[in-house]
Image: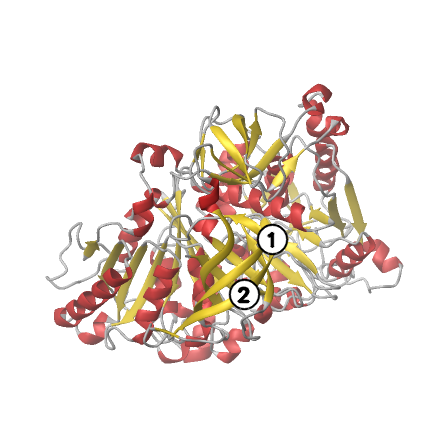
Amino acid sequence: MSTSLPRTRLSDAMTIDPADARSAGLSKLRALESEAIHVMREVASELERPALLFSGGKDSIVLLRLAEKAFRPGRFPFPLVHVDTGHNFDEVIEYRDRRAAELGERLIVAKVQDTIDQGRVQDGYDPSRQGSSRNQQQTQTLLDAIEEHEFDACFGGARRDEERARAKERIFSFRDDFGGWDPKNQRPELWNLYNGRLRKGENVRVFPISNWTELDVWQYIEEERLELPSIYFAHEREVVRRNGMLYAVSPFLQPQEGETVETLSVRYRTVGDLTITGAVESTASTLTDVVTEIAATRVTERGETRADDRVSEAAMEDRKAQGYF
Amino acid sequence: MSAANDPAPTASLLAEAGDPVGMPALRADLLRVATAGSVDDGKSTLIGRLLYDSKQVLADQLEQVEQASVRRHGEGTVDLSLLTDGLRAEREQGITIDVAYRYFTTGDRSFILADTPGHVQYTRNMVTGASTADLVIVLVDARQGVIEQTRRHTFIASLLGVRHVTFAVNKMDLVEWDEDVFRAIEDETTRISTQLGIPDIHVIPISALQGQNVVDRGELPDWYPEDEDHPTLLHHLQTVEVSTDRNLTDLRFPVQWVIRPGESAADVGGGRWSADDLHDYRGYAGQVAGGVLRPGDEVQVLPSGVRSRIARIETLDGDLEVATAPQSVTVHLEDDVDVSRGDVIVGADEDAEAITFRELEADVCWMSDRALRPGARYLLKHTTTTTVAKVDAVLDRLDLHTLEREDADGLELNDIGRVRIRLKRALVADPYLRDRATGAFILIDEGTNDTVAGGMIR
């Protein structure tokens, strides 16, 4: 049922050497990379005080590489910021500090513990309460850091394929004074023309890898040979099974009555707090093994490893409305 | 189709979900698709079907959909349209409020699907979705045939310079796969597209609900035989050729960011660059908007008109011999000239006058509750330049029912019309249909900072 009409309009203006077109065709990853670099340079050009949120997780590691591609040999026109809940994997913190030093870029660590000590939030973590975490409190710490350093834009590594509230979020996602996201009132985003103008009190979260999927991120990491924190690869760890997930035993998460500690070969698919991030059983010890496993997986990363998103059908939507990333 | 009126009577999709897709090719290319259709054309079901049948739906997502289906329609139902259900705000109101983006990969092509709602008042969403699309799928309900909305969506696709339009004639099962019904729609959609000058159109009969001819062919009548000329919808999306759509003739490199590290940056990158490298380093970073960039090419920098040659095309991964849209690169010129953000590097033989505009005629889609009135002042963002713009006149407004242009003294939300705009700073631009990247702009309200319009230069 095809009707190919004679080419008109656009093509009238062009004489194309088909060989040229083919050789110039970009692979998907390079097209996504170009788009992300463009977004980062727009933010650097149009906003006064950007920051890049760097958690040591794979998505923000990709952001760092994209920033190198966008700004080297210049310095990044922004610092790196880590919102630190204190409930981290040691391997991730070690990686975070080392990576920032290698890049020669400034790292600001905003601590949830400080926010708690100042009495600005109540600690959501209670060792005696299963599943409790500081997930909610990091929002306040982030908002405080934004205010203290007067950041007007924060790069984040969120992707639209992660979760359905994200699927509707713009690349430039404006937040009100309280960090809140209003999905019904987003600016239309046309072509690659981003409107970065802020109202007083507003700031913007910018997601350069919005259009990437989890697999794109892994393939990019592989293609770019990016180093990752070791917890992304299979290793032996003491874990307990809880609600169908495997949690690492740590000072913040102790086995409860009736739970047995097992030592299993596991890896992590996402990096979050020790208290809420589940591991998956795996023997994938190289990047290639991991990418192969991810490609064959049957469960989304957030469904498989993040307790924070399993709370309700609209868990992410609610948290975003309150200022979560 | 809305969730409420058409749950699929399947017991458990989870039980049927096939093997995972495995690894997409590393060299997969990317096709950006926008979908358009009215509320009851079955768009959500179609997208759900594409995702589901191409095995892109993971177990926990399916489980969620199954649970939601049962809650809403009762035991034993699975409603694929719920797969694309976004926000609670929408679920509660049974509407789609915004553009949603979906991702899937089959074989060696990846797709970004902009799902745009079809309500008449949501023209702005379709314009947004189509602005980045290579291809638009227009849903047609076989029972209703070509309706006003079909014409409108096709028109918007052509206005946004989308060269590939696919009409998916849905609900063929409800007209018993009647060939006459299909042919009538095929003739009418072909006629409309020809009139609009859309270069590549396809008309494909499907039933999203039954899963016929979307990803798998299923049982189809003899008049749609199994051969290359009668593809499934997905097969067509996988094979449509879009690499020649880009403008490879007119070099346009809008400078986005000037990299001048100075010696103080010598500690970045672990010693990869020496202080000597950095002392005189000056690179012009940006995304190629049109044409082909090669080292040695003679160029001019507009608006100054200063001439030089391309010395290097740099990326972090090494220098390039050639760059085309939409690559992000860093350009070095042979001469030490003054270049800043907003300048545009074009070919040396380009007639600078002919591509420099102080006044524009453009079609705009109005996206704000506050109407456009002649004489109003806005900020206009075009490539990497933002300038003050005054709308001198509203020349006409498109009647979205008849698609006729009529006189107008303003534009309201979701109106499309032609305007004449005067610019404070001259722009290096092209007609939109010659180069989408250098022919597009947005208007920003200085008071609210809202994006109030998308515009296409005539």
The x, y position of residue B274, in whole percent, is 70, 20
Q: Earlier in the sequence, mark 1 or mark 2?
A: 1
**Marking on residue A29:** none
The x, y position of residue B284, in whole percent, is 59, 34
Q: Residues within 10 Å of mark 1 (few under 14, many from 20)?
A: some
User: Can you identify the residue that label 1 sits on?
Assistant: B386
Q: Compute the Cα span from label 1 to label 2.
A: 15 Å
Tell which of B396 and A108 is nearer to you: B396
Q: Is residue B144 rendered to the left or right of residue B17?
A: left
Q: Which residue type does callout 1 highlight?
A: Thr
Q: Is residue A47 rendered to the left or right of residue B246?
A: right
Q: Chain of mark 2?
A: B
Tell which of A201 and A118 is nearer to you: A201
Q: Quadrant of the C terminus of chain A?
A: bottom right
The residue that appears at 74% across and 64% down in the rendered structure is A200
Tell which of B116 and A118 is nearer to you: B116
**Marking on residue B391:** 2
Q: Residues within 10 Å of mark 2 (few under 14, many from 20)?
A: many
Q: Is residue B458 visible?
A: yes
Residue found at the far right of this picture: A118
Q: Is residue B248 rendered to the left or right of residue B386?
A: left
Q: Which residue type does callout 2 highlight?
A: Val
